[in-house]
Image: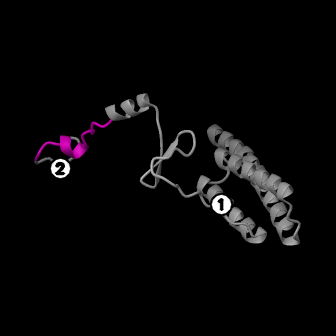
Amino acid sequence: MPKLRSAKKRLRKDEKRKLANKVKKTAVKNVERQIKKTLTEGKIQGEALGKLVNQFYQAIDKAAKTGAIHKNKASREKSRLAVMIMKKTGTTAAKPAKPTAKGKVLTEGQVLTGGARKVLRPKSEILKAGKKTAKAKSPRATRKKGSRRKGK
């Protein structure tokens, strides 16, 4: 047991955080189990499955946001679940439509030039971005010759 007052407080805080993190992790696991159960039983219904997937994404994003799990783990789990659903349901990811002509406007805010999509920005944003082009000097460039220490 801790003896210092601050150590006792830290222990109390850690217990509360551990409990909160466990609640978030079990919520994620429960929804994931439900999704896997519906997929293995063959009860693949678009709307019901979609709601479960939304619940899973919501739970895992909340857990990652609060630090219960790492954001990369959350991303990896979402990706694996999506791949598993695609394999079980037989659906594939939608392919983007191919452009017919260069420079043709596809949707609001996007234009095709040379086969690559570029997002159009307002002129004011482009001007602001142009002002930031001056390079900041690195510590090496500002260092005196003959000195080995950084910044001198």
Callout 2: SS: loop
Q: Is residue 110 above or below residue 98?
A: above
Q: Which residues are magenta?
A: 132-145
Q: Amino acid at mark 1?
A: Ala
Q: Which mark is residue 94?
A: 1
Q: Residues within 10 Å of mark 2 (few under 14, many from 20)?
A: few
Q: Which mark is residue 148?
A: 2
Q: Pinpoint residue 78: horizontal percent, then vertical percent.
A: 68, 58
Q: Is residue 47 left or right of residue 119?
A: right
**Distance of mark 1 from mark 2, alpha carbons?**
56 Å
Query: Is the C-beta separation of discs 1 and 2 under 8 Å?
Result: no
Total count of labels: 2
**Viewer-proximal residue, 116 or 130?**
116
Sequence-wise, the earlier of marks 1 and 2 is 1
Query: Which secondary structure dominates the residues rendered in magenta?
Result: loop
Q: Amino acid at mark 2?
A: Arg
> Which mark's residue is nearer the viewer, 1 or 2?
1
Q: Quadrant of residue 40?
A: bottom right
